[in-house]
Image: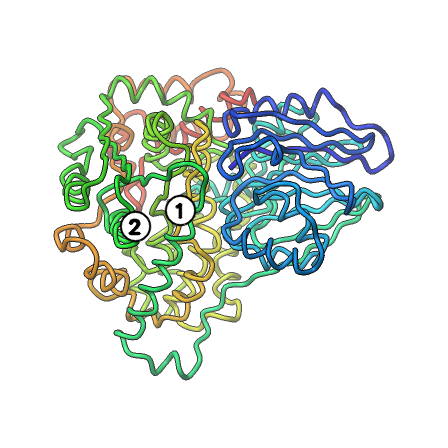
């Protein structure tokens, strides 16, 4: 896990070493162990390294392989790198390091743009061909690793974070009106290529983008998630699916223990993270370090789930650390947590992950985390009603959207209210082939879009703020493909994630499985009072916010007067949503 950046010129003008150095500097928290910049006239690569596999200098980046004429930078982890190395050695390739970065360079040389389909893991990659000047940008299948892009007057810059691109300069920081509508409507999920800024885009997941020396580009999408099922799949019993899922999930967890440093687990006390701990115990892991976090209660809502994380820690005899955060500490950490966001993210648990990562990074460099299980296995409340829906788009929007278009237009400045982009996006996505069942349509959009630009991004941004690598076994692509084939009725049973709970019953105590569904609770940000209310008010009434003019003044006054009355269908605070956007813009000097 690292941070990468770079620049390429399309008119033979030299790139800016200073800009690449500034971008690399911003990425320091992602890779605190070493820094490197490789400059070759019309292109440059920058890298910050977090040493996880092959701790020697032989795996330093940017990596240049003169024998094959390829240089590159890489962020992530290739879990099957040893198998790929053996295959490449069989083709005659020679290796100078013991890590996975060199595998990436030689795999591209051997197999071209098809190489990404051979990689198992999470990755963002930038490669430059010496002889052609061609730039290749790649992102993993489920977008676990980020890659942001910005056009410059002479070419293109790219980086692992949006703030790094801002540090490079020459970025159009005007608000992208389509992205703003997604942010306010689609629960702050902004699908690629958009970001909240006009001048920055993000490479879509499962994409290999080849950019020629003159700037012409083409995209190769190397993976698609299909919910189509064979006749054999349709005939399988629940028991068969359970056994197949058990084996696949166990392999996904095993893969993510590959490291030359210890690996811990973020243990929330829910089914997903508890199951990871249980499977690692089954695989023979002892002395596993686990971590959980809790906050002060607010408005009679509990701020921790320690009773469940303690139960799992005791049951499996883990080396467990509990972190309790008083409200004062939460308020102090908010600006730093917002500063760690590559894009404005409204979920309350951003700051929870930020503070948890800060503590965990003192103990380990790598953790496994349970993100993705709800989207992949049907754990959210909006899936069951879709099983018998006559209008799945409307029913999905009613449950998931923070506001319909009519309310959106009454909340924002008139010039921002054109078109219903979010509704049109969902309608188009639901209409795609490969998912006939209404529940499958929702699971697909949540896995391919919402998951990537909300929970996954949150985990990457907050953990990497402290040089902590988070691995997500529920997003193993083999596991996700298997889950898509499982008929939706097996996922919806037992209140959701039924088939996953069937596996869990073999591994972890029933008290954790049959408990009410929980989240990372941060009550103080849901019920804005006292200093949190003042923080939101100050941001939204500041000179910068007034000049920006995103929201109608009467809407803001209604939020300030009674924030508790303005709660979204997903139980989020409308005031926090508006304030978070403004706080993020100010934090990034926009």
Quarter-of-image position of residue 2: top right
Circle 2 sits on which residue? 280
In this view, the residue in front, 232 or 95, is 95
Circle 2: element type: helix
Find residue 88 and report its horizontal and vertical position in percent: 65, 56
Quarter of the image with the C terminus in it: top right
In this view, the residue in front, 4 or 320, is 320
Find residue 252 and report its horizontal and vertical position in percent: 40, 55
Distance in Å between CA atoms under marks 1 and 2:
9 Å
Quarter-of-image position of residue 455: top left
Please name the residue shown 62% across and 36% down the image: 200
In this view, the residue in front, 554 or 282, is 282
Find residue 150 and report its horizontal and vertical position in percent: 67, 35
Do residues under tags 1 and 2 come within 8 Å of each other at their CB atoms?
Answer: yes
Dot 1: few (<14), some (14–19), or many (≥20) neighbours within 10 Å?
some
Indicate left or right for 438 with 203 as reference.
left
Circle 1: element type: loop
Dot 2: few (<14), some (14–19), or many (≥20) neighbours within 10 Å?
some
Which residue lies most toward the right here? 12
- Residue 558 seen in the figure: no
Find residue 142 and report its horizontal and vertical position in percent: 50, 52
Q: Earlier in the sequence, mark 1 or mark 2?
A: 1
* Residue 329 drawn above or below residue 484: above
- Residue 456 seen in the figure: yes
Quarter-of-image position of residue 411: top left
On residue 257, which mark appears? 1
On residue 311, which mark appears? none
Indicate left or right for 539 with 9 as reference.
left
Indicate left or right for 165 with 566 as reference.
right
* Residue 197 drawn above or below residue 449: above
Please name the residue shown 51% across and 18% down the image: 544
Please name the residue shown 67% across and 34% down the image: 62
């Amino acid at each position: 896990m690292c941070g990468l950046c770079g620049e390429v010129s399309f008119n033979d003008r030299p790139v800016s070493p200073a800009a690449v150095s500034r971008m690399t500097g911003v990425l320091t928290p992602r890779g605190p162990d070493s820094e490197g910049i490789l400059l070759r006239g019309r292109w440059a690569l920058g890298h910050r390294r977090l040493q996880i596999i092959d701790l020697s200098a032989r795996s330093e980046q940017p990596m240049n392989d003169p024998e094959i004429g390829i240089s590159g930078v890489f962020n992530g982890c290739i879990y099957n790198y040893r198998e790929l190395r053996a295959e490449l050695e069989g083709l005659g390739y020679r290796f100078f390091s013991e890590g996975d970065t060199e595998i990436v360079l030689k795999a591209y040389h051997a197999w071209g743009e098809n190489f990404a389909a051979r990689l198992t893991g999470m990755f963002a990659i930038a490669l430059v061909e010496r002889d052609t000047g061609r730039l290749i940008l790649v992102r993993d299948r489920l977008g676990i690793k980020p890659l942001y892009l910005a056009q410059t007057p002479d070419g293109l810059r790219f980086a692992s974070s949006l703030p790094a691109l801002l540090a490079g300069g020459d970025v159009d920081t005007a608000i992208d009106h389509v992205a703003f509508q997604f942010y306010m409507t689609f629960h702050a999920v902004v699908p690629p290529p958009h970001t909240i800024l006009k001048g920055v885009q993000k490479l879509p997941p499962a994409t290999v983008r080849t950019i020629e020396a003159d700037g012409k580009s083409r995209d190769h999408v190397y993976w698609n998630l299909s919910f189509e099922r064979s006749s054999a799949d349709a005939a399988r019993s629940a028991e068969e699916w359970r056994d197949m899922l058990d084996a696949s999930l166990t392999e996904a967890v095993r893969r993510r223990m590959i490291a030359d440093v210890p690996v811990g687990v973020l243990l929330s006390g829910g089914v997903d993270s508890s199951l990871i701990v249980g499977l690692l115990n089954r695989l023979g892991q002892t002395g596993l370090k686990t971590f959980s976090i809790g906050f002060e209660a607010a408005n009679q809502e509990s701020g921790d789930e320690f009773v469940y994380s303690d139960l799992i820690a005791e049951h499996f005899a883990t080396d467990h650390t509990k972190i309790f955060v008083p409200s004062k500490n939460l308020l102090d950490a908010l600006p730093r947590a917002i500063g760690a966001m590559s894009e404005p993210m409204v979920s309350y648990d951003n700051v929870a992950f930020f503070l948890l990562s800060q503590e965990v990074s003192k103990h380990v460099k790598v953790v496994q985390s349970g993100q993705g299980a709800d989207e992949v296995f049907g754990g959210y409340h909006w899936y069951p009603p879709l099983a018998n829906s006559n209008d799945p788009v409307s029913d999905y929007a009613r449950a998931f959207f923070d506001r319909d278009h009519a309310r959106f237009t009454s909340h924002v400045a008139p010039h921002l209210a054109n078109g219903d982009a979010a509704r049109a996006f969902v309608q188009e996505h639901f209409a795609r082939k490969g998912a006939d069942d209404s529940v499958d349509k929702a699971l697909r959009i949540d896995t391919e879009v919402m998951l990537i630009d909300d929970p996954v991004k949150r985990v990457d941004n907050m953990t990497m703020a402290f040089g902590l690598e988070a691995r997500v076994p529920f997003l193993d692509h083999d596991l996700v493909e298997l889950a898509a084939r499982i008929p939706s009725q097996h996922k919806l049973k037992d209140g959701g994630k039924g088939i996953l709970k069937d596996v869990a019953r073999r591994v972890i105590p029933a008290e954790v499985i049959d408990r009410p569904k929980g989240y990372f609770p941060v009550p103080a940000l849901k019920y804005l009072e006292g200093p949190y209310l003042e923080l939101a008010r100050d941001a939204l009434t500041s000179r910068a916010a007034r000049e920006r003019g995103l929201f109608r003044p009467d809407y803001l006054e209604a939020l300030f007067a009674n924030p508790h009355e303005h709660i979204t269908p997903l139980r989020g605070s409308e005031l926090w949503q508006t304030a978070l956007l403004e706080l993020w813009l100010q934090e990034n000097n926009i």
